Amino acid sequence: MSRTAIAAELDRLTALRLVEEIGPAGFRGGRSATIDISGSVRFVGIAIGATSVSVAVTDGRLQVLALHRTECDVRQGPEPVLDLATKLSRKLLLGSGVDKPLGVGLGVPGPVDFGRGIAVSPPIMPKWDRYPVRDRLAGQFDCPVAMDNDVNVMALGEQLAGVASTVDNFLFVKIGTGIGCGVVANGQLYRGMDGCAGDIGHIRVPECDVPCLCGNTGCLEASFGGAALGREALAAARSGRSPLLRELLERNGTLTAAEVGQAVSAGDAAAMQLVRDGGRRVGEVLTGLVSFFNPSLIVLGGGLTKLGHILLAEMRSVIYRRSLPLATRNLPITMSDAGQRAGVIGAARLVSDQVYRLPR
């Protein structure tokens, strides 16, 4: 860009209160003041999961100023969930000293038409199908709103604030209620033609005929998502294969991934085998992606990663054993550094990129 074009762009950003002069700098020709991102800039990042909503307010550098997470069932439908997210956002904004953000970013656990800002046939959130999520939030906050699926925004958050900050080609794999993969190629998030890139949860796995919420059978998500693990744990408890899981079932009335994690920590053999089996299935799918994409890093996130090293070890074992040496000799496979913050940071970054983008 020419000096004139840079000056014009800085004037535009200043008029929009996106940047500000923060004091004189040593004279080096041209402008004599230091320009920085405005201290009043606030973005809101919202990460909606299957069972929770996380909301964060960030500054212009996407540093989290306030964060709140609460339990919430996404199957309630868009209106009550979005009302809750809006209420939490306004409370955190007021606490940070402003009443209006310059942008709101949102991640949801289902396929998203990025251009239109809607969810399309999301298996675990059927009431959200084609609901105008982006437009509703834009009307609530009177600012730009950007929306994508949850694993894509988590990949953006990990790239900004996690272990993926030093690489340009990586896969972010979320293993939770659902299973998905964010693909970053040459430093840019890759969505594919219709935004479906990375939907690995619905790749068919061998020797599995369990019905999936998408309508097919044998999907990876149906064999090792959060609901699948709870189902397998229930079977192990009732069959007597795991006295500990049976005890947890009698105590709590149900079994979830959290109870499986407790059993794994206690050394329960049946629970450990459930996790190994799931890690093997995910590893087999990722082996195909490694051969196809040749990433320089694989990052694992999502609720089921709390199951710990046994899951990571099984996935590593399968990928390193089944892939060609050239594809894995420099391939770290690691847990997320950003953790639960990845989603809200990535959502804020999603809209920040839109707000600061040069006008065409």
Image: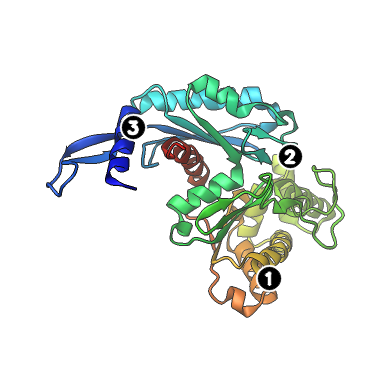
Q: Secondary structure at mark 3?
A: helix
Label 1: state its secondary structure. Answer: helix
Which circle, 2 or 3, is nearer the viewer? 3
Q: Report x, y in % for residue 126.
A: 75, 32
Residue annotated with mark 1: 318
Residue 11 image-quadrant placement = top left
Q: Which residue sits at x=46%, y=31%? A: 103
Q: Residue at image x 22%, y 35%?
A: 21
Q: At label 2, which amino acid type do we have?
A: Gly
Q: What residue is pinned by disc 3?
A: 12
Q: Is residue 217 left or right of residue 203?
A: right
- Whether 11 is drawn above or below 289: the answer is above
Q: Which mark is residue 253?
A: 2
* Amino acid type at mark 1: Val
Image coords of residue 178 (percent x, y): 69, 47
Kindly check if marks 2 and 1 are in contact, taking CB atoms under 8 A apart as contact: no
